[in-house]
Image (cartoon, grey):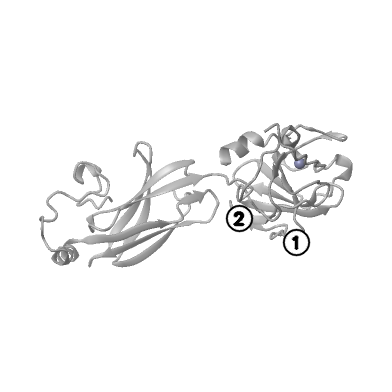
Amino acid sequence: MRTSPTLLVCAAALAAAALPTPALAGDGGGAAAPDEAPSRAGGGTYGAHVPGEHKAGRPDRSRRRAARRRGMLLTSFRLRRRHLFLHGRAARLLFTLEGRRPIRMRLRVLSAADRSRVATIDLGERSAGAHSVAFTGLEAGALPEGRYVLHLVGHGLRRAPTASSTADLDFSHHAFPVAGSFDWGGEDARFGARREGHRHQGQDLAAAEGTPVVAPRGGMVEVVQYQAGGAGHYVVVDGDDEDYDYAFMHLKTGSITVEEGDRVRTGQAIGEVGSTGSSTGPHLHFEIWEGGWYDGGEPIDPLPLLESWV
Ligand SMILES: [Zn+2]
């Protein structure tokens, strides 16, 4: 940390005198039958068959025929996008059912650590066929950060031997803003480091020019501007459902993909690492403000949060 030879002089603090006019006025079933209770699903093993449901050695085809008569059979289940972000792109639950009568399906969200139930989401009546259901982590209020097992259940639902009724999910509330290799830099990269006439208001993250810069949190793009003598090309995003504004500076010329007023998702690319403005090498100058960016808020040290997002 202290030995980085690269000195990234970054005058991006936007001294009050050089401040641009703010662009915006605003502040800134485990196949268990007949019930879903694990205790009735063969000793509480998720995805287990109900004891006695199938006779050993019975051919698979006749088993399936029997299933069609009796109820619904889960023949596949998987999760597209295993790592999900709050206010990010939705994951998709993909599952297929065989059977004659529609059944009410539910998704149980279980803690990966102890399998305790965190939420149950109603997926409605489902008929035979392929199903694709969006999952955002907002279905039952914002899902806390963590690792989960998603468990597909339904009244009278059983599971084909080749199918799983569970899928693993990692859920995060923030994305790391540099989507690629980076370096924390030394003391000079830190929040509060001395700069000529002011103190450094962010954390510098050294990375190759062109490395994608992504929104740590979905929200509203408040500012897209250029400041020749300081921040270079920069973007400010107001995070959704939290009191943080994020500023991204020295972005590469022509790399910014958002406009003021756009909404962005967590993890969405907004530009690329560059060295525009007052900068001596490619890096992202990253600020977090509690409250509005130059609009009633205060910059805070981004390092502890960055370290928790990496
Ligand atoms: Zn900086």
Which one is earlier in the sequence, the residue at label 2 or at label 1? 1
Left of 308 or right of it: where is 302?
Answer: right
Looking at the rendered structure, the secondary structure element under dot 2 is loop
Residue at 21% across / 46% down in the picture?
A: 41
- Residue type (three-letter) at the residue carrying disc 2: Gln
Between label 2 and label 1, give the one nearer the viewer: 1
x and y, in percent, of residue 260 in the image: 73, 57
- Residue type (three-letter) at the residue carrying disc 1: Gly
x and y, in percent, of residue 47 in the image: 26, 49
The answer to which image quadrant residue 15 occupies is top right
- The residue that mark 2 highlights is 268
C-alpha span from label 2 to label 1? 17 Å
Q: Is mark 2 within 8 Å of ligand 1?
A: no
Q: Is residue 225 above or below residue 27?
A: below
For the residue pair 262 and 228, the one nearer the viewer reads as 228
Disc number placed over residue 254 in the picture, else none: 1
For the residue pair 181 and 11, the one nearer the viewer reads as 181
Q: Is residue 28 above or below residue 257?
A: above
Circle 2 residues within 10 Å: few <14, some 14–19, many ≥20: many
User: Which quadrant holds the C terminus?
Assistant: top right
Visible residue check, residue 28: no
Left of 167 or right of it: where is 6?
Answer: right
User: Which quadrant holds the N terminus?
Assistant: top right
Ligand 1 shown in quarter: top right
x and y, in percent, of residue 13 in the image: 80, 41
Visible residue check, residue 277: yes
Residue at 70% across / 44% down in the picture?
A: 206
Residue at 63% across / 56% down in the picture?
A: 269
Disc number placed over residue 73 in the picture, else none: none
Looking at the rendered structure, the secondary structure element under dot 1 is loop
x and y, in percent, of residue 190 in the image: 72, 34
